[in-house]
């Protein structure tokens, strides 16, 4: 194990530092096995439905998109997302499950992918063996930014 040292980092850069460390250690998900949850570029109307939903799990997914929007195509560890959102990893897992149910109810006759790609790899959080890494495409990031800033939101 490498020697650990304390480094003061401005709060707004903590996640970026974690991501850099993960990349340096080869834990970005770039070589991770991709799950069946492939990201898809959702049409704007579907992203608006996600944005406007009152369901807590869908609001949580909107918050995840907000976190990922400025770092498209960059896998971010689930544990880092939970930390950034200020919720326990276990609670975030429940919210993500709720989002999957919302997608299934909204499109019951279709097989709809999430607007987020999910990969699995060695965990950044050393208390677990592996974890999910979430990312969004550049086009989804651009659409989400535009939709988040529409008048009335």
Image (spheres, rainbow, N blue to C red):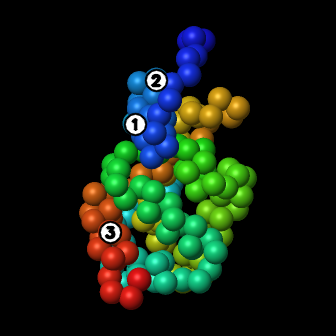
> Is 134 in front, or is 18?
18
* Residue appearing at x 59%, y 83% in the figure: 54
Please give the name of the residue rendered at 42% of the width and 55% of the height, measured from the top-left corner: 68
Considering depth in this image, is 148 or 5 the residue closer to the camera? Answer: 5
Where does residue 11 sit, x and y in percent of width and height? Answer: 49, 43
Separation (CA) of disc 2 from disc 3: 30 Å
Could you tell me which secondary element the residue under label 1 belongs to? loop
Residue 149 vs residue 124: left or right? left
Extreme residue in the bottom direction: 152
Residue 41 badge: none
Quadrant where the image shows the C terminus: bottom left
Disc 3 marks which residue?
145
Front position among marks 3 and 1 = 3
Residue 129 appears in the rendering: no
Q: Tell me which residue sits at (54%, 83%) in the image.
A: 53
**Quadrant that contains the N terminus:** top right
- The nearer-to-camera label among 2 and 3 is 3
Which residue is under mark 2? 25
Real-space Cα separation, disc 2 to disc 1, in angstroms? 11 Å
Residue 20 rendering spot, x and y as whole percentages: 41, 32
Q: Residue at x 56, y 73 (%)?
A: 59
Please name the residue that numbered disc 1 is placed on: 30
Q: Secondary structure at mark 3?
A: helix
Q: Quick one: label 2 or label 3, which is nearer the N terminus? A: 2
């Amino acid at each position: 194990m490498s020697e650990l040292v304390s480094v003061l980092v401005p709060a707004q850069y903590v996640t970026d530092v974690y991501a850099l460390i993960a990349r340096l250690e080869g834990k970005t998900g770039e070589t991770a096995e991709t799950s069946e949850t492939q990201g898809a570029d959702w049409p704007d109307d579907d992203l608006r439905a996600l944005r406007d939903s009152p369901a807590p799990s869908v609001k949580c997914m909107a918050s995840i998109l907000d976190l990922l929007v400025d770092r498209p195509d960059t896998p971010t560890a689930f544990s880092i997302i939970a930390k950034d959102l200020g919720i326990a990893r276990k609670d975030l897992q429940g919210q993500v499950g709720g989002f999957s149910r919302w997608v299934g109810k909204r499109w019951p006759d279709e097989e709809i992918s999430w607007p987020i790609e999910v990969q699995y790899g060695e965990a950044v959080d050393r208390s677990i063996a592996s974890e999910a890494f979430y990312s969004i495409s550049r086009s989804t990031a651009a659409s989400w930014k535009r939709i988040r800033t529409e008048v009335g939101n």
